[in-house]
Image (cartoon, grey):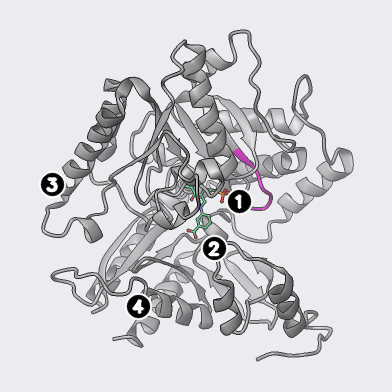
Amino acid sequence: MNRPIASKNQPYNTLSIRALDLSHHMHPFADQQELVSDGGVRVITRGEGVYLWDSEGERLLDGMGGLWCVNIGYGRKELAEAAAKQMEELPYYNTFFKTTTPAAAELAAEIASVAPNRLDRVFYSNSGSEANDTNIRLARLYWARLGRPERKAIISRHNAYHGSSIGSGSLTGFDDMHDIAGVPIADVHHAPAPFWWRDGRGQTVEAHCAWALDGLEETILRVGPENVAAFIGEPVQGAGGVLIPPSGYWKSVQEICRKYDILLICDEVVCGFGRTGKWFGSQTYAIEPDIITTAKGLSSGYLPISASVFGDRVASVLMDKPGRMSHGYTYSGHPVAAAVALENIRILKRERIIERVGEETGPYFQAKLRELLDHPLVGEVRGVGLMAAVQLTRDKEERTPIEPVSSLAKPVWKRCFETGLITRAVGESLAFSPPLIISKDQIDWLVKRLRDNLDQFV
Ligand code: PXG
């Protein structure tokens, strides 16, 4: 229902905001014509805990934590206060050349205190995309400084999401992201990644995993190991459909990287800061990366900030030898974003939020979602910690793909959205990544609402 006139209790005029938005706002990853034909966008005005409210006062449970990022939930006053205090004291200064700020320095140390594999040197950017651009650049610089400039290829994977800038978008492994000239950039190569439900029909999980690993090694050999700078991978592929690595997969990937002396970059933008039930996905899957990418959960999405974190192998070449590193952004280590991220990490620590995900709510969420396996439209439930995908199907036996893709997931997603539950249609699955503070009762509600909505499509 649209209320044309704003009132005291309902201060937003939905129709007029929608009209302004349709006329002037270009939405990311949107088909603008579809937005128009759907009657325009929903106006989100407020958040508290796991809930959002729209301009009509309707409540939504945010099963996606924004875009996989609002880890501590909405409405934490401490973060607002940290931002206000920093803004009053020093709203901006840069970290180029010879200056820093207390917030940027303290946050770097705080990140180092939780990072996997003793990675302890932090380069700041403002988004996951920029951080991955940083990684491309610094991985290549590392090899150039070692006298090996030909080592410039980056191996990524199909179904990977690493960002949408020209560099990080090249790493991303979706064809529709490569629909303009010049993308992917030169020297980026995509290897197979395991996605047993969709791509491993007729294979055991083990055989499918071996196929993906062989494909990775073949890609490296085709490019020539002597030309490869780094391999990049998400511990769990998030936007690709919450693709859980088969047992032993990461151990083998790591062995391949070591065999050919290739840097290992773990993109922890989604997995980092508690999503998988440990601080980082690298810890959940016993990966020892040389570099990690973090963003999203670093500030719980309250302000844009990201960090590439390096271990001694790379940092000792880039930092402990003379020579300028000509790379950075105006807002690298922005003090307000850094102050907010610092408070965010302290809250995660103080309230033992990640421990609770690992021990309690993560396993509960996974078990509850798996109860849906008795539903005629649910083929598989994948997930770890508080990230999951519910794979929809009309053919549990043969796993015949639904054509066209998303023709079931999208209407289900839409119905969920209309009935107060935010999820995300990824291919033929529904993805979930709720705030890490979600309670068991809220998990029960989420799963029940999803089941009721699925029932409408049987
Ligand atoms: N790496 C990973 C693993 C990501 O998931 C990025 C890098 C890029 O981050 P920025 O901050 O530049 O967006 C991401 C972002 C979706 C969706 O709908 C996923 C992302 C972003 C937007 C939408 O699944 N992931």
> Quarter holding the N terminus?
bottom right
Question: Picture quarter containing residue 322?
Answer: top right
Q: Which amino acid does label 4 sit on?
A: Leu
Q: What span is colored magenta in the figure?
A: 301-306
Q: Distance between the residues labelled 1 and 2?
A: 21 Å
Residue visible at 40% across and 77% down in the picture: 450
Q: Name the residue under label 2.
A: 29
Comparing labels 2 and 3, the label whose residue is closer to the camera = 2
Comparing labels 2 and 4, the label whose residue is closer to the camera = 2
Q: Is residue 312 visible?
A: no
Q: Mark 3 points at which residue?
A: 207
Q: What residue type is labelled 2?
A: Phe
Label 4: few (<14), some or many (≥20) within 10 Å? many
Q: Mark 1 points at which residue?
A: 300
Label 1: few (<14), some or many (≥20) within 10 Å? many
Furthest-front residue in this view: 181
Residue 384: image tag: none
- At mark 4, the secondary structure is loop
Is mark 3 in CB contact (under 8 Å) with mark 1?
no
Q: Which amino acid does label 3 sit on?
A: Ala
Residue 408: image tag: 4
Residue visible at 61% across and 80% down in the picture: 36
**Cβ(mark 2) to ligand 1 < 8 Å?**
yes
Of the numbered discs 2 and 3, the one sitting upstream in the chain is: 2
Comparing labels 1 and 4, the label whose residue is closer to the camera = 4
State left or right for residue 133 relative to residue 187. Answer: right
State left or right for residue 408 relative to residue 137. Answer: left
- At mark 1, the secondary structure is loop
Label 3: few (<14), some or many (≥20) within 10 Å? few
